[in-house]
Image: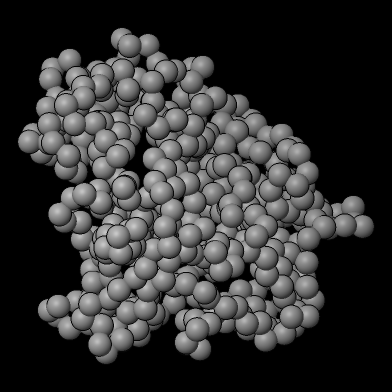
Amino acid sequence: MKLFKRTLGILMAVVIAASVALIPATASAAKVKTAKQTISVYETAAFDVFYTKYHKFKLSITNNSKKYLKASINYDAGDSEFGQYFALIVTGLKKTPKKDAPVVTVYYKNKDGKKVTIAKAKVTVKGTKPKAQNFKNLTLNPGTLAPSQEIVGNYYDVEERISDKSVVKTDYNSPYTTTDIYRGEYSDCGYVKALKKGTATISYWLKNYNVKLGEYKVTVKDVKTTINKNYETVELKYFDGKLNKLYDRNQFYTALVLENYHKDAVYTSKIEDESVLSAKTVKKGKVSPNTNELLSAKKTGETKVKIYEQKKGSSKKTKVGTVNVKVEPATMADIVEAGDRDHSVAGIYFMCIEKDETVDGFESVRLTWLENFNESDYTIKLTTDDTKVFNIDENGKVTRLSNAYARITIEVTFTDGSVFTTENYPEFDPSANVAYDD
């Protein structure tokens, strides 16, 4: 979970990252399926509970005499295309017995006073302490930013404490440029900003239990700008054709290969072989620092790039270091994977197939990933790990035989020999995911 929003924001990060969607039966059914999850002490499990009619839902917990769990309902979780849902929030307080782990039941009472169960969750708590956090100490130049640290584990209501707020500040609601040197796009992880020279400690605590998850030290001082050791060699790929513009690994941002940049400095490059690589200045503020260059592959090959720093008020350019650039040929499968990373592949992904419904699997794959290719460029193969759930014929027609989860594997083989593979677990009929109350 990333600590980038407060309270509800942290909750929603947990919901997205670690939720297990309950699949309750309708109110008229005899049984409700019990969802299961294992967490550590003080960790939080979040379950999405769908409903079509609002009630004042209540909770009960069996086998919880020694207070292994704490459970609550958050009605602000949100809406989906399948209906409204709330989040069942369950926090582990102490290690549960190996047998008879507590079961949380969500229910309401109908107009006749009868208890109607809509969801159940069995939660096992293991361990006795929160996970150790692998935080790294930071050294920053005054006025510069660094990405915020990530907390490992699903914790709710985390509080931050800064030993000296005159030295550093944090902001988890504003974006910071990701360390992805190829895309240079915004990430929502938040940032740490160095305000003045000095040292401060940033620690994270579980607010309700006064338990410290971890801490790291931030030292603010004048530091020499260098090339990040991870990027002394940058590997790019180039697709020889019009599809190259769809690929996101054929370029990189100069600023993002730097370690300890200076706030008001200008960074420029000198390319040894300009037939392999080109440079252009990108809009101010696109990435950090403010002035930056985008270096793009023009063909396959190798070259060196020298990066220079010019500090504010100085006419002198100082060499920061050299980056070795290798450009390899990209494949058709690389182009598809780039689109997948970009999330522009509007997910058909067989998102929902109802029982006895048949969908055109090949057409779904084409519309989702392959619109930029000719049909002669590839062949598609679909398989499932459970033929009792899905039947797939030689023409790519997918039929759901039963309401159960099973995997569909999608394999696209291109004429250049490259292969793109992904998989999906289609949902049932949407009504199977909704807790009907009447």
Question: Is residue 330 something that shows in the picture?
Answer: no
Q: Quadrant of residue 259?
A: bottom right
> Would residue 154 appear left or right of 234 to someone viewing this image?
left
Q: Give the percent coordinates (x, y) of residue 97.
A: 17, 83
> Would residue 188 appear left or right of 435 to someone viewing this image?
right
Q: Which residue is at 25% across, 51% downward?
A: 27
Q: Give the percent coordinates (x, y) of residue 73.
A: 43, 66
Q: Which residue is at 52% across, 74% downward?
A: 157
In terms of depth relative to the viewer, which is nearer, 384 or 374?
384
Q: Which residue is at 62% across, 82% downward?
A: 161
Question: Is residue 118 something that shows in the picture?
Answer: yes
In terms of depth relative to the viewer, which is nearer, 228 or 24?
24
In terms of depth relative to the viewer, which is nearer, 80 or 55?
55
Count all numbered tags in the image, as a single digit: 0
> Would residue 130 appear left or right of 97 to someone viewing this image?
right
Q: Quadrant of residue 420?
A: top left
Q: Which residue is at 21% across, 35% downward?
A: 408
In terms of depth relative to the viewer, which is nearer, 257 or 438?
438
Determine whether 326 is above or below 260 in the image: above
Determine whether 267 is above or below 66 in the image: above
Q: Residue furthest front?
A: 112
Q: Residue furthest right?
A: 313
Q: Residue furthest left?
A: 388
> Would residue 226 appear left or right of 371 to someone viewing this image?
right
The figure's colour scheme reads: one colour
